[in-house]
């Protein structure tokens, strides 16, 4: 056998094996489902309008920043879904504390893919 034939005889199987490994790793990467990174900002962006009845509301003292920690039990009404109970804790501006008393209705936003993620409809409150 001449040297060129020997080189081809060795290189061709190695090249075939290399291409097969490359092809299989590409196919395997394409099959893996990509996990969607979901953070609070993503949830707020896809949240839809909803409303709730306030069943109970507990306010903490007003801080030096003019906000109060408020814990509420809500009866949430998300369009296209049955009503469901939920608990939320928000930091609420001192001037807006009158909006969140027991028995009042509250406009809010809810993530339809995670209805436990409930956000205030406005800048007067921030979820904790």
Image (cartoon, rainbow, N blue to C red):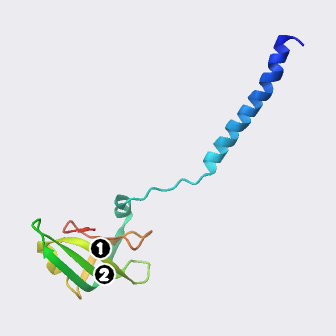
Dot label at residue 46? none
Q: Residue at x 19, y 72 (%)?
A: 92
Task: Give percent across and percent down for residue 54.
Answer: 27, 84
Label 1 Cα crowd, 10 Å radius (few <14 / some 14-19 / many 20+) = some
Query: For numbered disc 2, what is the local secondary structure?
Result: strand
Query: Is residue 12 toward the left or the right of residue 88 in the image?
Result: right
Residue where numbered disc 1 is placed: 108
Residue at 79% across / 25% down in the picture?
12
Residue 32 x %, y % = 60, 52
Q: What residue appears at the point 9 percent right and 67 percent down from the top-left corner?
A: 64
The quadrant holding residue 84 is bottom left
Residue 53 higher or lower than 11, as above or below: below
Point 31% across, 82% down: residue: 74
User: Where is 97 relative to 31, above or below?
Assistant: below
Residue 128: quadrant of the picture: bottom left
* Residue 70 position by quadrant: bottom left
Q: Is residue 44 left or right of residue 9?
A: left
Q: Mark 1 and mark 2 in contact? Answer it, CB < 8 Å.
A: yes
Q: Position of residue 94 (x, y in %)?
A: 12, 73
Q: Give the labeled residue for mark 2.
A: 52
Judging depth in this view, the residue of 44 and 2 nearest the camera is 2
Q: Mark 1: which secondary structure? A: strand
In this rendering, the answer to whether 113 lies above or below 32 is below
Query: Can residue 27 be seen here?
Result: yes
Q: Position of residue 119 (x, y in %)?
A: 30, 70
Q: Answer whether residue 100 is visible to the viewer in this image.
A: no
Give the left or right position of residue 26, taking residue 92 as reference. right
Q: Is residue 87 left or right of residue 8?
A: left
Task: Tell me which numbered mark, 1 or 2, is placed earlier along the sequence.
Answer: 2
What is the count of numbered marks? Answer: 2
Task: Locate the N terminus by quadrant.
Answer: top right
């Amino acid at each position: 056998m001449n040297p060129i034939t020997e080189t081809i005889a060795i290189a061709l199987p190695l090249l075939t094996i290399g291409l097969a490994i490359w092809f299989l790793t590409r196919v395997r990467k394409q099959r893996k489902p990509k996990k969607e990174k979901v953070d609070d900002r993503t949830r707020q962006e896809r949240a839809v309008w909803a409303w709730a009845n306030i069943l109970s509301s507990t306010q903490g003292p007003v801080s030096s920043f003019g906000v109060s920690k408020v814990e509420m039990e809500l009866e949430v009404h998300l369009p296209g879904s049955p009503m469901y109970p939920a608990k939320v804790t928000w930091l609420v501006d001192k001037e807006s504390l009158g909006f969140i008393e027991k028995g009042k209705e509250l406009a809010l936003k809810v993530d339809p893919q995670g209805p436990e993620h409930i956000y205030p409809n406005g800048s007067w409150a921030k979820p904790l």
